[in-house]
Amino acid sequence: MQCLPGNKGERKLTMAVLLIVMLGIFTAVAAFQKYAPPAPTPVEAESPAAVLPLTGWRIVVDAGHGGYDGGARARDSGLWEKEINLAVAKQVEKALTQRGAAVFMTRTGDEDLCSDSRPAHKTMKREDMENRVALAVEAKADMVLSIHMNEYRDRTQSGPQVFYRQGCDSGRLLAGAMQEALIARLQPKKERAALAGDYFILQLDVPSVLIECGFISNAAEEKLLLSKNYQQRLGEAIAEGVESYAALAQ
Protein backbone atom coordinates (compact mmCIF):
# COMPACT_ATOMS: atom_id res chain seq x y z
CA MET A 1 0.00 0.00 0.00
CA GLN A 2 1.34 3.41 -0.94
CA CYS A 3 1.44 6.06 1.77
CA LEU A 4 0.05 9.31 0.62
CA PRO A 5 1.92 12.37 1.78
CA GLY A 6 -0.07 14.67 4.05
CA ASN A 7 -0.46 18.31 3.46
CA LYS A 8 2.31 20.79 4.01
CA GLY A 9 1.09 21.85 7.50
CA GLU A 10 0.98 18.27 8.77
CA ARG A 11 4.56 17.59 7.62
CA LYS A 12 5.87 20.67 9.48
CA LEU A 13 4.05 19.61 12.64
CA THR A 14 5.54 16.10 12.46
CA MET A 15 9.09 17.45 12.00
CA ALA A 16 8.67 19.77 14.97
CA VAL A 17 7.50 16.92 17.20
CA LEU A 18 10.49 14.77 16.17
CA LEU A 19 12.94 17.58 16.92
CA ILE A 20 11.42 18.09 20.38
CA VAL A 21 11.63 14.35 21.17
CA MET A 22 15.27 14.11 20.01
CA LEU A 23 16.23 17.20 22.02
CA GLY A 24 14.66 15.64 25.11
CA ILE A 25 16.63 12.43 24.63
CA PHE A 26 19.95 14.29 24.25
CA THR A 27 19.21 16.38 27.35
CA ALA A 28 18.43 13.26 29.43
CA VAL A 29 21.66 11.51 28.31
CA ALA A 30 23.77 14.57 29.17
CA ALA A 31 22.18 14.83 32.60
CA PHE A 32 22.83 11.16 33.35
CA GLN A 33 26.49 11.49 32.35
CA LYS A 34 26.87 14.54 34.60
CA TYR A 35 25.27 13.12 37.75
CA ALA A 36 25.83 9.40 37.40
CA PRO A 37 28.43 8.00 39.85
CA PRO A 38 31.82 7.15 38.30
CA ALA A 39 32.53 3.56 37.43
CA PRO A 40 34.22 1.77 40.32
CA THR A 41 38.01 1.55 40.14
CA PRO A 42 39.30 -2.02 40.39
CA VAL A 43 40.83 -2.61 43.84
CA GLU A 44 44.27 -4.18 43.75
CA ALA A 45 44.96 -6.81 46.36
CA GLU A 46 47.31 -5.53 49.03
CA SER A 47 50.65 -7.28 48.98
CA PRO A 48 51.58 -8.89 52.30
CA ALA A 49 54.11 -6.96 54.41
CA ALA A 50 57.65 -8.07 53.75
CA VAL A 51 59.06 -10.23 56.54
CA LEU A 52 62.54 -9.07 57.52
CA PRO A 53 65.22 -11.78 57.81
CA LEU A 54 65.61 -11.50 61.60
CA THR A 55 61.97 -10.92 62.52
CA GLY A 56 61.19 -12.82 65.73
CA TRP A 57 64.80 -13.04 66.93
CA ARG A 58 65.58 -11.64 70.38
CA ILE A 59 69.26 -10.72 70.51
CA VAL A 60 71.35 -9.37 73.38
CA VAL A 61 74.23 -7.12 72.30
CA ASP A 62 76.80 -6.81 75.06
CA ALA A 63 79.25 -3.92 74.88
CA GLY A 64 82.13 -5.38 76.87
CA HIS A 65 83.53 -3.61 79.97
CA GLY A 66 82.24 -0.16 81.01
CA GLY A 67 82.23 2.04 84.09
CA TYR A 68 85.08 1.20 86.43
CA ASP A 69 86.31 -1.46 83.95
CA GLY A 70 88.00 0.18 80.99
CA GLY A 71 89.29 -3.02 79.41
CA ALA A 72 92.40 -2.79 77.25
CA ARG A 73 93.83 0.56 76.19
CA ALA A 74 94.63 1.58 72.63
CA ARG A 75 98.38 2.02 72.22
CA ASP A 76 98.40 5.23 70.16
CA SER A 77 95.19 7.11 70.94
CA GLY A 78 95.02 6.08 74.59
CA LEU A 79 91.28 5.36 74.33
CA TRP A 80 89.87 2.67 76.55
CA GLU A 81 88.43 -0.43 74.98
CA LYS A 82 85.07 0.17 76.69
CA GLU A 83 84.51 3.30 74.55
CA ILE A 84 85.17 1.55 71.25
CA ASN A 85 83.13 -1.49 72.28
CA LEU A 86 80.09 0.70 72.91
CA ALA A 87 80.44 2.59 69.63
CA VAL A 88 80.55 -0.67 67.66
CA ALA A 89 77.75 -2.26 69.74
CA LYS A 90 75.45 0.63 68.81
CA GLN A 91 76.18 0.03 65.12
CA VAL A 92 75.41 -3.67 65.62
CA GLU A 93 72.13 -2.74 67.32
CA LYS A 94 71.20 -0.50 64.37
CA ALA A 95 72.03 -3.12 61.73
CA LEU A 96 70.15 -5.89 63.56
CA THR A 97 67.09 -3.71 64.14
CA GLN A 98 66.96 -2.85 60.45
CA ARG A 99 66.76 -6.59 59.78
CA GLY A 100 63.81 -7.03 62.12
CA ALA A 101 65.48 -8.28 65.32
CA ALA A 102 64.46 -7.20 68.82
CA VAL A 103 67.73 -6.00 70.35
CA PHE A 104 68.57 -5.70 74.06
CA MET A 105 71.71 -3.81 75.07
CA THR A 106 73.53 -4.68 78.30
CA ARG A 107 74.60 -1.04 78.48
CA THR A 108 74.02 2.11 76.44
CA GLY A 109 76.50 4.40 78.20
CA ASP A 110 79.71 4.30 80.19
CA GLU A 111 78.46 2.22 83.09
CA ASP A 112 79.14 -1.12 84.69
CA LEU A 113 76.52 -3.55 85.97
CA CYS A 114 77.64 -3.59 89.58
CA SER A 115 75.76 -2.56 92.72
CA ASP A 116 76.90 -1.18 96.05
CA SER A 117 75.07 -3.94 97.90
CA ARG A 118 76.95 -6.93 96.52
CA PRO A 119 78.22 -9.57 98.97
CA ALA A 120 81.70 -8.97 100.34
CA HIS A 121 82.99 -12.21 98.85
CA LYS A 122 81.92 -11.27 95.32
CA THR A 123 84.18 -9.14 93.15
CA MET A 124 82.86 -6.26 91.07
CA LYS A 125 83.87 -8.10 87.90
CA ARG A 126 82.02 -11.25 88.93
CA GLU A 127 78.83 -9.38 89.75
CA ASP A 128 79.07 -7.36 86.53
CA MET A 129 79.32 -10.52 84.43
CA GLU A 130 76.54 -12.30 86.34
CA ASN A 131 74.23 -9.35 85.76
CA ARG A 132 74.95 -9.38 82.03
CA VAL A 133 73.99 -13.05 81.86
CA ALA A 134 70.91 -12.39 84.02
CA LEU A 135 69.83 -9.65 81.61
CA ALA A 136 70.01 -12.11 78.71
CA VAL A 137 67.90 -14.61 80.67
CA GLU A 138 65.34 -11.94 81.55
CA ALA A 139 65.14 -10.84 77.91
CA LYS A 140 64.55 -14.46 76.86
CA ALA A 141 67.35 -14.01 74.37
CA ASP A 142 67.72 -16.29 71.37
CA MET A 143 71.32 -15.16 70.94
CA VAL A 144 74.09 -13.23 72.72
CA LEU A 145 76.75 -11.14 70.95
CA SER A 146 79.54 -9.74 73.13
CA ILE A 147 81.60 -6.98 71.51
CA HIS A 148 85.28 -6.53 72.40
CA MET A 149 88.62 -5.27 71.09
CA ASN A 150 91.80 -7.32 71.17
CA GLU A 151 95.24 -6.29 72.42
CA TYR A 152 98.62 -7.97 72.35
CA ARG A 153 102.23 -7.05 73.06
CA ASP A 154 103.20 -7.96 69.49
CA ARG A 155 101.91 -4.97 67.54
CA THR A 156 101.95 -6.86 64.23
CA GLN A 157 98.96 -8.98 65.31
CA SER A 158 95.71 -8.01 63.58
CA GLY A 159 92.33 -9.22 62.37
CA PRO A 160 88.92 -9.91 63.93
CA GLN A 161 88.32 -13.22 65.67
CA VAL A 162 85.18 -14.89 67.05
CA PHE A 163 84.97 -17.16 70.10
CA TYR A 164 82.27 -19.62 71.19
CA ARG A 165 81.76 -21.98 74.14
CA GLN A 166 83.28 -25.41 73.76
CA GLY A 167 80.56 -28.05 73.38
CA CYS A 168 77.86 -25.64 72.23
CA ASP A 169 77.13 -26.65 68.64
CA SER A 170 74.85 -23.69 67.95
CA GLY A 171 77.52 -21.33 69.24
CA ARG A 172 80.11 -22.99 67.01
CA LEU A 173 77.87 -22.60 63.95
CA LEU A 174 77.17 -18.96 64.79
CA ALA A 175 80.88 -18.28 65.31
CA GLY A 176 81.72 -19.83 61.94
CA ALA A 177 79.08 -17.79 60.12
CA MET A 178 80.23 -14.66 61.95
CA GLN A 179 83.90 -15.21 61.17
CA GLU A 180 83.12 -15.69 57.47
CA ALA A 181 81.01 -12.53 57.37
CA LEU A 182 83.73 -10.46 59.05
CA ILE A 183 86.32 -11.65 56.56
CA ALA A 184 84.05 -11.12 53.56
CA ARG A 185 82.95 -7.62 54.57
CA LEU A 186 86.19 -6.27 56.11
CA GLN A 187 88.80 -8.19 54.09
CA PRO A 188 91.38 -8.08 56.91
CA LYS A 189 95.05 -8.59 56.20
CA LYS A 190 95.07 -11.49 58.68
CA GLU A 191 92.23 -14.00 58.20
CA ARG A 192 91.63 -15.78 61.47
CA ALA A 193 89.44 -18.77 62.33
CA ALA A 194 86.71 -19.00 64.97
CA LEU A 195 87.87 -20.71 68.17
CA ALA A 196 86.41 -22.12 71.38
CA GLY A 197 86.98 -19.87 74.38
CA ASP A 198 86.28 -19.94 78.10
CA TYR A 199 84.30 -16.74 78.63
CA PHE A 200 81.62 -16.22 81.30
CA ILE A 201 79.25 -14.40 78.94
CA LEU A 202 79.04 -17.51 76.71
CA GLN A 203 77.61 -19.85 79.35
CA LEU A 204 73.95 -19.71 78.27
CA ASP A 205 72.46 -22.55 76.24
CA VAL A 206 71.69 -20.27 73.30
CA PRO A 207 74.04 -19.46 70.41
CA SER A 208 76.50 -16.98 71.89
CA VAL A 209 79.76 -15.53 70.66
CA LEU A 210 82.41 -13.11 71.84
CA ILE A 211 83.67 -10.99 68.94
CA GLU A 212 87.16 -9.51 69.12
CA CYS A 213 86.68 -6.88 66.41
CA GLY A 214 90.38 -6.22 65.91
CA PHE A 215 93.62 -5.27 67.67
CA ILE A 216 93.87 -1.83 69.24
CA SER A 217 97.54 -2.63 69.79
CA ASN A 218 98.08 -2.61 66.00
CA ALA A 219 98.63 0.97 64.77
CA ALA A 220 96.83 0.58 61.43
CA GLU A 221 93.93 -1.45 62.83
CA GLU A 222 93.48 0.93 65.74
CA LYS A 223 92.89 3.79 63.28
CA LEU A 224 90.28 1.70 61.50
CA LEU A 225 88.51 0.72 64.71
CA LEU A 226 88.25 4.38 65.74
CA SER A 227 86.71 5.32 62.37
CA LYS A 228 82.93 5.71 62.34
CA ASN A 229 82.82 4.34 58.79
CA TYR A 230 84.67 1.19 59.83
CA GLN A 231 82.48 0.83 62.92
CA GLN A 232 79.43 0.92 60.63
CA ARG A 233 81.02 -1.75 58.43
CA LEU A 234 81.63 -3.86 61.53
CA GLY A 235 78.00 -3.48 62.54
CA GLU A 236 76.83 -4.60 59.10
CA ALA A 237 79.29 -7.51 59.02
CA ILE A 238 78.14 -8.78 62.41
CA ALA A 239 74.48 -8.47 61.40
CA GLU A 240 75.21 -10.36 58.19
CA GLY A 241 76.84 -13.11 60.25
CA VAL A 242 73.70 -13.36 62.38
CA GLU A 243 71.53 -13.42 59.25
CA SER A 244 73.62 -16.23 57.75
CA TYR A 245 73.29 -18.26 60.93
CA ALA A 246 69.54 -17.64 61.11
CA ALA A 247 69.15 -18.97 57.57
CA LEU A 248 71.09 -22.12 58.53
CA ALA A 249 69.05 -22.58 61.72
CA GLN A 250 65.69 -22.65 59.91
Image (cartoon, rainbow, N blue to C red):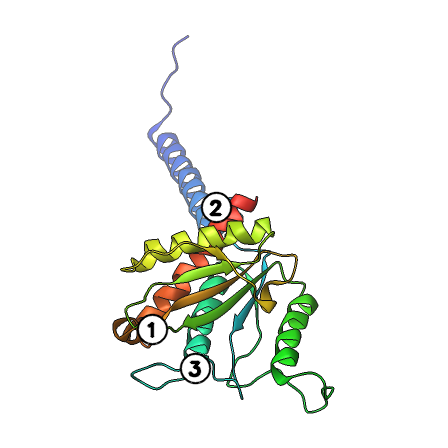
The 10 Å Cα crowd at callout 3, few under 14, some 14 to 19, many 20 or more, is: many
- Picture quadrant of residue 106: bottom right
Residue hosting label 1: 225
- Is 44 above or below relative to 213? above
Residue drawn 32% across the image and 66% down it = 158
Q: Disc 3 designates what residue?
A: 83
Q: Residue type at mark 3: give it.
A: Glu
**Residue type for callout 2:** Thr
| Helix, strand or loop at mark 3 | helix
Q: CA distance from mark 1 to mark 3?
A: 11 Å
Residue wearing tag 2: 41
- Can you name the residue that lies furthest to the top here? 1
Residue at 32 percent of width and 69 percent of height:
230
Q: Nearer the viewer, mark 2 or mark 3?
A: 3
Spatial CA distance of label 2 from label 3 is: 58 Å
What amino acid is found at the position of numbered circle 1 in the picture? Leu
